[in-house]
Amino acid sequence: MDNQDQARLNWFKILKRIGYEYYKIKNYIRALEAYQKALEIDPNNAEVLNGIGRVYYASNETAQALNYFQQALAAAPDLTSENVCYYNIGLTFEKMSQYEEAMQAYEQALIRSPDDQKTQHRKAVLLSKLKKEG
């Protein structure tokens, strides 16, 4: 890796971190700007695509969130990343009141990481909600 490639990689990591830090303090406009700049460097980075999805999810733009979570899933490099994507997809479907799709996403997440307590909890909450409604 030459110096220019290393500089681009470092800048990518910085932008990704800036996006995350802005997301944490709920400055979604700045978070999105940083994540979009990171995508210009690495357009298929699952972590950045998930970050953008989280920004849209937090902004109640569920269709946009779902789009980015699905892109992240397609770019996911391993089962752990796929688990995160499916969990986020499940949350988004749940927020959209598409409970069957949410349950399917949580089940896919648990196939990839059966011991994931966060996903187990969301699935249990959703099952309880469906029993109360049904």
Image: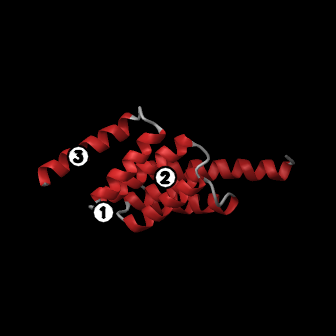
Amino acid on which the number 1 mark rests in the picture: Met
Which residue in the protein does label 3 denote?
127
Q: Which of marks 2 and 1 is nearer the N terminus?
A: 2
Left or right? Give the position of 26 relative to 30: left
Q: Residue 96 carries which label?
A: 1
Q: State the residue at coordinates (55%, 63%).
A: 33
Q: Residue at x 24, y 44 (%)?
A: 125
- Mark 1 or 3, nearer chain start: 1
| Residue type pointed to by label 3 | Leu
Residue 25 appears in the picture as rendered:
no
Mark count: 3
Q: Which of 116 and 46 is in front in this view?
A: 116
| Left or right of residue 134: residue 72 | right
Q: Quadrant of residue 122?
A: top left
Cα gap from disc 2 to disc 1, whole angstroms: 25 Å
Which callout, 3 or 2, points at the residue further toward the start of the chain? 2
User: In the rendering, which numbered label is found on residue 22?
Assistant: 2
Label 2: element kind: helix
